[in-house]
Image (cartoon, helix red, strand yellow):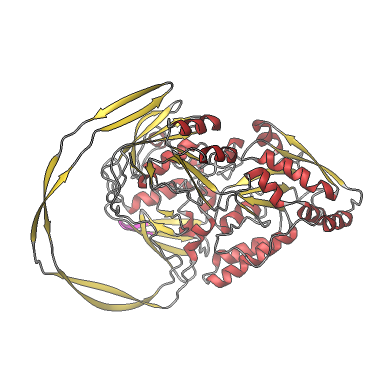
């Protein structure tokens, strides 16, 4: 679930590059926030409800059989068995049927621009067929902080925050925005002010009711520079937040922005109760999520217990989730093969074949906008020369490199970060294929008729060493001679990455919607602009897209940006790896989330 990427706007400790998450969000997922641009009169309906009680009492007996339940928990080298034996109960259930007659009266017409229409892709009431109880054991790398606004520095922190807290809005598996703690939203005519409706019936684990003040507090805290949340730089266009009443929030922006609802899916924006202190949030758990924090030992494991009062009726199904901390991938892979753990997110591509051969392990994957890249420093010689960058673009065999880096999985990228499933993806431009003759022409035009020597700096993250070595072999026939410098992790992120000494480096980005991916990676002067690309027209197009309420016009802006990047090649966007989760076959309803921002473990259940 965690990728090699920083999720903070100040230059972070390099380990953050390992931490995906959840990008927030799959590109197609989050951009859906702007697909409804209806500017027509909308009738506001007032319902006058008259209830005519017609009660029919039905008595039925239901025999509930509770079987012997055996939990096996592997800790170190021993197995502990716990048998739970309960008796058969007979329950008498009374069902009352009530007819309700509704009269509907139209009282007025108003005109509202709704920028993002919530589409519920995941049911809020549990369907039938699942079984309650049991434990799911996860193998994760490590645990960092308990503060949801700061998490992202570790895999364990990310799962913890998702399972014990809730976002205002989440992204579904199909890319739609799902109303969560916020259940509705609309914008004014120019999308410079948004009004949000807060869901009723949600309680924090303390028993406190969720109100608009909690939403306000969460985002005010994230905007405070003293918090140092990675979310700050992604919502700093919010100028004022007002809790109008317990159920209504109004946010004023510094200008039009059609993408605000999508930013609420970012995994640093879990909702906190108002007036929580930093001391409290870093030492305890205060969420509304499907699970509550039980035992917590960051060196060994964290236990999360079922929240019986979760607002999503019927969820979760599991009694508990246990995260075991296993820094080495090989350890996690062997643990799931043996049954010591039930799930691993993001197993290595090299391990997938052995996992697929295990009858008790299921591998799920989803297409993703996560992307592996090679960055040129476009602000300095020699890579300020566009012809030189074009030579690299035509010299690389993307299929060959993807086979080495992803073992043939995933898809090739087209020299921009917009994912193929994103609604703003420009699908009319074919991906440039290897053309050695054309690569040599560009190399000559760049002033290197006899070839070009360079050093590619990388480290062994996300199969990027394998990618770098395959790239070296791929471009050699064009006269591009690449020396691969495999730095240790600390050296790479602190001394090589984004430093003038090393103008050609490897990197990896987690999935983001188009506007976020382009802004974070390529806007002039951006802290994470790894290529130091400076193009005023790109900046202008991003601003125009943010302010544009019409989808077709916005899409044209993004098309021009993608065309520009393919032509300029500030970054070689090579491949989009899939998101992968491996799980034991006894665990049901597991899905791979395209953006890795959500796991929806509350949907899982055990079939023993």
Residue 375 locus on image (x, y percent): 71, 47
Asked if residue 145 can be seen in this view, the reply is no
In-front residue for pair 212/48: 48
In-front residue for pair 28/438: 438
Is 12 part of what is drawn in magenta? no
Extent of the magenta region? 243-249
Position of 57 with respect to 524 (left or right) is left
The quadrant where residue 281 appears: top left
Q: Main secondary structure of the magenta part?
A: strand
Q: Is residue 26 above or below residue 225?
A: below
In-front residue for pair 372/112: 372
Asked if residue 176 can be seen in this view, the reply is yes
Residue drawn at x 40%, y 53% is 168
Residue 471 locus on image (x, y percent): 74, 45
Position of 422 with respect to 493 (left or right) is left
| Image quarter of the C terminus | top left
Q: Is residue 348 above or below residue 425?
A: above
Q: Is residue 9 above or below residue 76?
A: below
Residue reaching furthest to the top: 77
Q: Is residue 16 above or below residue 324?
A: below
């Amino acid at each position: 679930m965690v990728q090699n990427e920083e999720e903070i706007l100040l230059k972070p400790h390099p380990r953050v590059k390992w931490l995906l998450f959840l990008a927030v969000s799959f590109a197609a997922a989050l951009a859906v926030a702007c697909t409804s641009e209806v500017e027509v009169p909308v009738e506001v309906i007032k319902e006058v409800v008259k209830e005519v009680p017609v009660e029919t009492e039905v008595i039925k007996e239901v025999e509930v059989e509770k079987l012997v339940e055996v939990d096996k928990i592997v800790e170190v080298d021993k197995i502990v068995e716990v048998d739970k034996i309960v008796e058969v109960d007979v329950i008498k259930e009374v069902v009352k049927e009530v007819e309700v007659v509704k009269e509907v009266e139209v009282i007025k017409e108003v005109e509202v621009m709704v920028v993002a229409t919530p589409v519920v892709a995941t049911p809020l009431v549990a369907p039938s067929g699942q079984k309650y109880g049991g434990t799911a054991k996860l193998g994760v790398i490590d645990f960092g902080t308990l503060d949801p606004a700061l998490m992202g520095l570790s895999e364990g922190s990310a799962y913890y925050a998702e399972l014990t807290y809730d976002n205002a809005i989440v992204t579904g598996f199909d890319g739609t925005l799902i109303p969560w703690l916020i259940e509705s939203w609309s914008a004014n005519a120019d999308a410079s002010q948004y009004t949000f409706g807060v869901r009723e019936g949600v309680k924090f684990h303390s028993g406190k009711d969720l109100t608009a003040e909690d939403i306000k507090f969460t985002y005010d805290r994230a905007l405070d520079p003293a918090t140092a949340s990675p979310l700050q730089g992604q919502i700093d266009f919010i100028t004022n937040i007002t809790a109008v009443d317990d159920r209504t929030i109004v946010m004023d922006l510094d200008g039009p922005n059609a993408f605000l609802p999508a930013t609420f899916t970012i995994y640093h924006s879990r909702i906190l109760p108002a007036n929580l202190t930093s001391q409290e949030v870093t030492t305890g758990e205060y969420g509304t999520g499907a699970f509550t924090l039980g035992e917590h030992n960051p060196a060994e494991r964290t236990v999360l217990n079922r929240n019986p009062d979760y607002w999503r009726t019927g969820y979760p199904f599991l009694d508990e989730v246990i995260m075991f901390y296993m820094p080495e991938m090989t350890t996690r892979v062997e643990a799931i093969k043996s049954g010591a753990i039930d799930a691993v997110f993001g197993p290595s591509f090299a391990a997938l074949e052995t996992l697929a051969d295990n009858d008790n392990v299921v591998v799920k994957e989803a297409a993703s906008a996560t992307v592996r890249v090679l960055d040129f420093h476009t602000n300095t010689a020699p890579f300020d020369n566009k012809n030189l960058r074009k030579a690299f673009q035509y010299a690389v065999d993307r299929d060959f490199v993807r086979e080495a880096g992803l073992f043939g999985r995933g898809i090739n990228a087209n020299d921009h970060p917009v994912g193929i499933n994103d609604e703003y993806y420009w699908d009319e431009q074919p991906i440039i294929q290897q053309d050695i003759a054309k690569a040599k022409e560009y190399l000559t035009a760049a002033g290197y008729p006899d070839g070009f020597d360079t050093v590619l700096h990388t480290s062994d993250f996300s199969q990027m060493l394998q990618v770098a070595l395959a790239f070296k072999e791929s471009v050699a026939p064009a006269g591009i001679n690449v020396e691969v410098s495999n730095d240790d992790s600390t050296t790479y992120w602190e001394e090589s990455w984004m430093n003038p000494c090393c103008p050609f480096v490897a990197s990896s980005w987690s999935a983001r919607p188009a506007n976020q991916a382009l802004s974070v990676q390529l806007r002039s002067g951006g802290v994470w602009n790894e290529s130091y690309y400076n193009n005023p027209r790109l900046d202008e197009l991003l601003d125009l897209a943010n302010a544009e309420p019409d989808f077709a016009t916005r899409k044209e802006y993004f098309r021009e940006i993608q065309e520009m990047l393919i032509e300029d090649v500030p970054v070689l966007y090579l491949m989009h790896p899939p998101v992968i989760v491996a799980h034991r076959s006894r665990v049901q309803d597991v899905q791979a989330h395209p953006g890795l921002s959500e796991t929806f473990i509350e949907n899982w259940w055990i079939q023993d």
